[in-house]
């Protein structure tokens, strides 16, 4: 909504452009305000994505044009398997309790024209890498087309937000309540690293885990992030 306003000289100034906090924008504002009020802690790690990049290329060559596989599918798969071993991270914070959830339902943040949506991949730990690639692509496409079914936005237990396609080196996302954790992924960039005593160039990806300290303490959160890093670096069981 726009309205004119007068300058000191009495001439009309350009109209002010305003975006009302209603609809999707209003829902985002309310949810982010609630998430910001949580006593949150963030911790970061860098992971060598050499093995995942190699396996992604091999899988893409096998699949051809039948499905597009991105690193997001590998992150989703590694995240689901790591959450399976860390139930306190796959939880919801209720008024006076922490609810541990058996299902691992990953919400994937998707940028849409007027804001942000987070459709949910249910029972993610039971799905193959290819299945996760296909489902995440379908959900993102439906979100951008405005055709998501309402139930696809419900029952998420942990959120992944990936800004790897931008130039961002790191960021700390806001928790998606009532979830207790969210993972922010930044770009993958070639960097010099030391391997077996030699300096080599490797694709390094940044990760930031933000968690609600009421539900999870620092040490178990750090162990969770470390195991996620190791799983992505080895790419053995993905």
Image: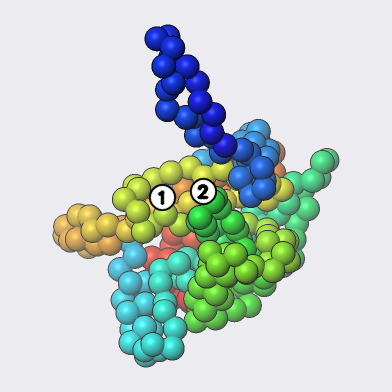
Secondary structure, mark 1, is strand
Say which quarter of the image contains residue 56: bottom left
Secondary structure, mark 2, is strand
C-beta proximity under 8 Å, tags 1 and 2: yes
Q: Which mark is residue 96?
A: none
* 12 relative to 114 in the view: left or right: left
Q: Percent position (x, y) of residue 98?
A: 77, 48
Give how far apart the Cα atoms at labels 1 and 2 are. Answer: 9 Å
* 172 relative to 35 in the view: left or right: left
Q: Percent position (x, y) of residue 78?
A: 51, 67
**Residue 216 seen in the figure:** no
Residue topped by disc 2: 209
Task: Name the outermost residue toward the front.
Answer: 11
Considering the image in quadrants, where does the N terminus appear? Answer: top right
**Residue 28 vertical placement versus 81 (above, below):** above
Q: Which residue is drawn at 30% across and 68% down?
A: 50
Q: Percent position (x, y) of residue 204?
A: 31, 58
**Residue 229 vertical placement versus 20 (above, below):** below
Q: Percent position (x, y) of residue 69?
A: 42, 77
Q: Residue at x 38, y 57 (%)?
A: 164
Q: Residues within 10 Å of mark 1 (few under 14, many from 20)?
A: some
**Residue 22 vertical placement versus 144 (above, below):** above
Q: Which residue is drawn at 36% across and 59% down?
A: 165
- Which one is earlier in the sequence, the residue at label 1 or at label 2? 1
Residue topped by disc 1: 45
**Residue 135 seen in the figure:** yes
């Amino acid at each position: 909504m726009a309205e004119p306003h007068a300058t000191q000289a009495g001439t009309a100034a350009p109209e002010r452009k305003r975006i009302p906090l209603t609809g999707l924008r209003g829902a985002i504002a309310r949810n982010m305000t609630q998430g910001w009020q949580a006593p949150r802690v963030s911790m970061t790690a860098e992971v060598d994505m050499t093995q995942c990049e190699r396996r992604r290329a091999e899988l893409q060559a096998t699949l051809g044009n039948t499905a597009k596989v991105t690193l997001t599918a590998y992150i989703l798969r590694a995240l689901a398997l790591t959450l399976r071993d860390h139930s306190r991270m796959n939880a919801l914070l209720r008024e006076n309790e922490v609810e541990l959830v058996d299902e691992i339902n990953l919400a994937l943040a998707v940028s849409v024209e007027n804001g942000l949506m987070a459709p949910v991949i249910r029972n993610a730990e039971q799905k193959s890498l290819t299945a996760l690639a296909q489902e995440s692509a379908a959900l993102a496409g439906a979100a951008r087309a405005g055709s998501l079914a309402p139930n696809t936005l419900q029952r998420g237990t942990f959120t992944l937000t990936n800004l790897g396609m931008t130039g961002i080196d790191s960021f700390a996302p806001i928790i998606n309540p009532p979830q207790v954790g969210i993972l922010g992924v930044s770009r993958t960039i070639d960097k010099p690293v030391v391997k077996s005593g030699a300096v080599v160039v490797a694709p390094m990806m940044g990760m930031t885990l933000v968690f609600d300290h009421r539900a999870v303490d620092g040490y178990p959160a750090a162990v969770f992030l470390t195991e996620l890093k190791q799983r992505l670096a080895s790419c053995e069981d993905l």
